[in-house]
Image: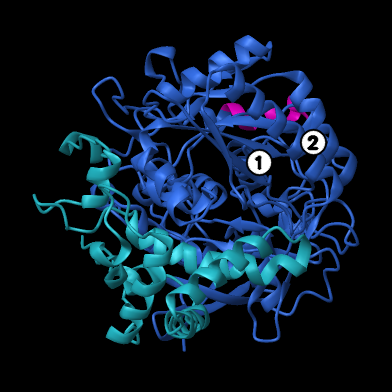
Chain colours: A cyan, B blue
Amino acid sequence: MTTPASQPIAAFSQRHEQALARIGDVLIPGNGSLPSYSESGAAALAPRALAGARPVDQVMMLRLISVVGALPRPLIALLLLCIRGGMRLPGIAGAPARLLDLALKGVVMNTYYCGLDRTAPDGDSAVFHALDFRLQMQVDDEDTK
Amino acid sequence: MKLSRYDYIIVGSGAGGGVLAFHLARAGKRVLMLEAGQRWQPRDYPDNELDASARLMWSGGVEPSQDASLMLMRGRTLGGGTVINQCLLDRFDDIALDDWAARSGLDSFSETAMGRHYDAVEADLSLQSIPESDWNGNARIYADGFDRLGYRRAPLRRGQSRCDVAGGNDCMRCLGGCPRASKQSTAATFLPRAEELGLEIITGCHIHGVVHGSAGVTVYGQVGREQVQFFAARCVLAAGTLGSSRILMNSGLGDALPALGKGFFCHPQFVTFARYAEPVDAHRGSFQALKSDDPRFRAAGFKLENVFMGPVAAAYLLPGGARAHQRLMRDYRHLACIEVAVRDVTPGRLSLSRGGQLRIHKSLGAPERKRAREGLKIIRDIYRVTGATEVAQAPTGIGLHLMGGCAQGLHRDSSVVNPEFAVHGMPRLHVVDGSLFPSAPGINPSLTIMALAHRAAEALLGGAQAPAGISRSVPADAAEVSA
């Protein structure tokens, strides 16, 4: 039995990673023991996170990251602020803001808070260290028979 | 090309497909199961939220409704939603079943008639109520708030066998598949038994459509890049509300089935966090232990759920700008969480775009907003009386219980599936999953989907005892008449 592979999307380039890191740093600038988004290296996980998305959504995400990530940081912050405000609009009027929030905040939070960074001094996740988060699960051979 | 012929093809392996496959295989039928997701050994399930979303769920995690007011989640793995849900298994009450009976015209929807089917599936599962000794801080806040405010609560009943929470295990891990095979998903229960009885399973198989003929049903789809076809005397769609509706619509049956895709419900859920001065550790142990059991809530159309989530989901749902958001996340261990789950009454609708993409039209109507507001007020009261220092309301609603779209009933104009679980006018094509629901019950649906699958097995096999309220003396295919 092999673990099913989830194919990272091939089109995610170094340029996309840098753009996503710029967006991520606005959402997660770092706070005491929590590293900033770029310090965590989380943007590199984006292709893995997007691997399960529909192809059409993957293409849209790459375009969105490229466009938003190319903006100056104050404009990125303003855009994210507008998105948060627009999310409150009811019905279809608020749909674009909510979809942008899902796309941008979704991928940033998913890659940052998943615990796959290895930036703590002991090689573990610095993010999980800061949260003091760990799940315990003892698995014995007997359990999975 | 010569096709292997099966007695039954079942599309989907969750609560409906898993139970049905077991009973059909046990009856000696040759059964093929087609599942879009992959097969996992329990110890290989992802150990992090990122991979769990990408590998175990459709669309990589969430699927938004058309107005993006709700984020919907559904499993894409062998075992379907039962692998990624919390396996909370409650029977429906008369409030839910009476409503179904009125809408469908089927008096088989009653506690008495369903009782035999609930009994049967419960006998094949390990069900445990969460004891107070397994409560974490979040459950204690929930219980304390309910007691102080005079609301009734009850222990949750969960499908689990050997979680060993006292030994330190954290069941939140099992939202990405239970590595101990303790959670009673169909992947850990009905499917292995069915395979021992001869069930064949093909995973990674995405179904495009079906063609119903006089001698059987052809199912077509793809495995990887290879186009595939399968043929069986009968086909059962158990791909869930979105999956089964999509397959029927993509098969060109929308015109013949005017109710197809209509009556979509999802129990919209709204999460509220609270911060406490002391650690809550809501992620530890049995992270869901209690449920609201207050008749006033039931009458008002909502329930309050003692729930929590991993850091990724919490981070997505917590509101606020950069530094405020990070401050709340840094206090993750100090966060409590309660959500209001609304029994929605405003039906949504499923459709296909011209490109064949599924569209989910589901807006929150005035009744849902009112019910949510009432529940959220009580949640804030609970947090106030239990000493929370800060309360944060998630800006986005979520939907985990996807129901309807292929409602069961007597008449073609208001339902898709007849009392014998066959699509109206297509005696060899069946649907057995949550899409059968005529309305939202306001109760977790998994156990009832399983019970309906048991009832469907009897109908398909021409069982000795027909479900109450349905007069039937011949097997389902012969009994079918055009509606």
Q: Earlier in the sequence, mark 1 or mark 2?
A: 2
Give the image quarter of residue B270.
Answer: top right
In the image, which disc is placed on residue B455?
1
Q: Is residue B118 magenta?
A: yes
- Badge 1 sits on which subunit? B
Residue beneath the point at 67% across and 78% down? B250
Seen in the image, is A126 located left or right of residue B434? left
Q: Is residue B230 above or below residue B451?
A: below
Seen from the viewer's position, the closer of residues B268 and B442 is B268
Q: Is residue B470 above or below residue B25?
A: above
Seen in the image, is B317 located left or right of residue B301? left
Label 2 environment density (alpha carbons within 10 Å; few <14, some 14–19, many ≥20): many
* Principal secondary structure, stretch drawn in magenta: helix
* Residue ID for mark 2: B108
Label 1 environment density (alpha carbons within 10 Å; few <14, some 14–19, many ≥20): many
Is residue B363 among what the camera can see?
Answer: yes
**Which residue type does callout 2 highlight?**
Ser
Residue beneath the point at 73% across and 80% down? B252
Seen from the viewer's position, the closer of residues B293 and A129 is A129
Q: Is residue B265 magenta?
A: no
- Please provide percent x and percent y for residue A85: 65, 61
- Pick the quarter of the image with the C terminus of chain A: top left
- Please provide percent x and percent y for residue B71: 60, 57
Seen from the viewer's position, the closer of residues B297 and B158 is B297
**Which residue type does callout 1 highlight?**
Arg
Magenta span: B108-119
Circles 1 and 2 in contact, beta carbons < 8 Å: yes
